[in-house]
Image: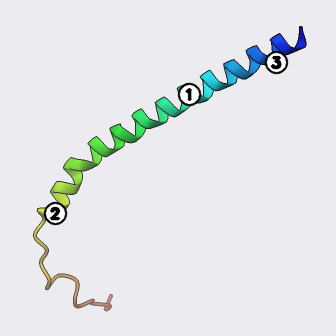
Amino acid sequence: MYIAVLSMVMSQSRVQESAGIAVMKMAINTGKESATPIREMVNNVVVDTNVGQHLDIRS
């Protein structure tokens, strides 16, 4: 009897672990899809190299 219960518990544990991994993979893929447009936007930004070279500290 104990072996059957132990087997069921271990099986449920594996199913929960597999489901957790599947959800994590989906979240990673969603993050990658969301990051792609942001990455493209950042790569297309023109940077003015003269900005930020001088700091006026008088108040």
Residue at point 48% right, 30% down? Answer: 22
Which corner quadrant holds the N terminus? top right
Residue on which the image places disc 1: 18
State the image coordinates of residue 21 (x, y, percent, origin top left). Answer: 52, 33
Q: Is residue 29 above or below residue 56?
A: above
Residue at point 31% right, 92% down? Answer: 58
The label shown at residue 43 is 2
Residue with the most extreme right position: 2
Residue at point 35% right, 39% down? Answer: 29
Of marks 3 and 1, which one's residue comes earlier in the chain?
3
Q: What's the residue type where badge 2 is placed?
A: Asn
Q: Is residue 4 left or right of residue 18?
A: right
Q: Are marks 2 and 3 in contact (CB under 8 Å)?
A: no
The kind of secondary structure element at disc 3 is helix
Q: CA distance from mark 3 to mark 1?
A: 18 Å
Q: Nearer the viewer, residue 7 or 37?
A: 7
State the image coordinates of residue 41 (x, y, percent, origin top left). Answer: 16, 56
Q: What's the residue type where badge 3 is placed?
A: Leu
**Of marks 3 and 1, the one in the foreground:** 3
State the image coordinates of residue 37 (x, y, percent, origin top left). Answer: 19, 48
Q: Is residue 26 above or below residue 55?
A: above
Q: Nearer the viewer, residue 42 or 1?
A: 1
The kind of secondary structure element at disc 2 is helix
Q: Are marks 3 and 1 in contact (CB under 8 Å)?
A: no
Query: Which quarter of the figure has residue 27?
Result: top left
